[in-house]
Amino acid sequence: MINSEFKVIETKSETADVKSVKLEKESFNFNPGQYAMFELGLDDPENGNTRPLSIASSPTENFLLFSTKISSTLFKQKFNNLKINDKVKIKGPMGIFVLKEDAKEIVFLGGGIGITPFRDMVKYATDKKLPIKLTLLYSNRTPNDIVYKEEWPVFEKENPNLKVVNTITENATGWQGKTGRIDKNMIKEFCNDLSNAMFYICGPPGMVEGLSNLLKTMNVLQQNVKIEKFAGY
């Protein structure tokens, strides 16, 4: 468990309300999918100054990437205003929502900012050339809400085993891709083997619960389903 300061080396607005920061990696070992406690210097007696954030970068990359949805809370505003050379404290890694490297097929079901651990896992599997059939079904309200939008086509080119499917839940003029929430038909369309595939679900609690229940009705074994809930704060 590492508990030390890291320097901000880059900041980026991923969407209108999602911000990313890259940190100098130094010595920080973790498994793809884990998270860390992210501490900022702020005075918030009610909510504290730490939050759990998924590590969005892969262990194969030479930086640590964290992305979060910006809101009006003190923590999120401080995160939004981080600048290059600022220092933040990281404690971790933590969590068991990690990539099963010997799986034959994995289906990632993501929504909104719940995409962060999936970027980590997809990038890791791609860099390590793992022979896993990977499908990412990623749901957002509009095309402009897709996080890491420019990276997904790059990862698909680099990894012949990867398929990224963006689906949009609101009417979007000119959108040529999938529409509607992730449902049974969409999962069956892109999953080769429901009996043996691993399913990872990450997103808002309501979405995670709904998809978990959906997979039960599709007779997916509970042991083949991993979940991570992203509550707002």
Image: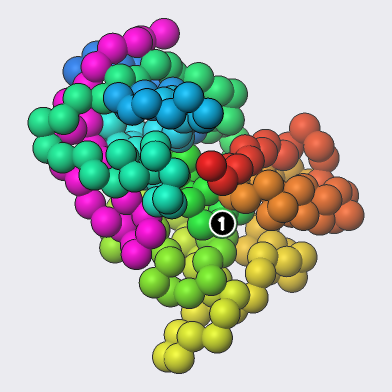
Quick check: 42 left or right of 81?
A: right
Q: Residue at x 73, y 66 (%)?
A: 183
Q: Residue at x 42, y 91 (%)?
A: 174
- Answer yes or no: is residue 83 visible: yes
The x, y position of residue 223, in whole percent, is 77, 32
The residue that mark 1 highlights is: 111
Inspect the magenta stretch and tell me whether residue 3 lies in it.
Answer: yes
Say if 116 sits above or below 178 in the image.
Answer: above
* Dominant secondary structure, magenta: strand
Of 199 and 74, nearer the camera is 74
Of 61 and 64, nearer the camera is 64
The x, y position of residue 98, in whole percent, is 54, 29
Residue type at mark 1 is Gly
Magenta stretch in the rendered image: 1-24
Q: Residue at x 29, y 46 (%)?
A: 80
Say if 138 sits above or below 97 in the image.
Answer: below
The x, y position of residue 132, in whole percent, is 51, 43
Of 130 and 119, nearer the camera is 119
Quadrant location, the N terminus: top left
Q: Residue at x 66, y 58 (%)?
A: 191
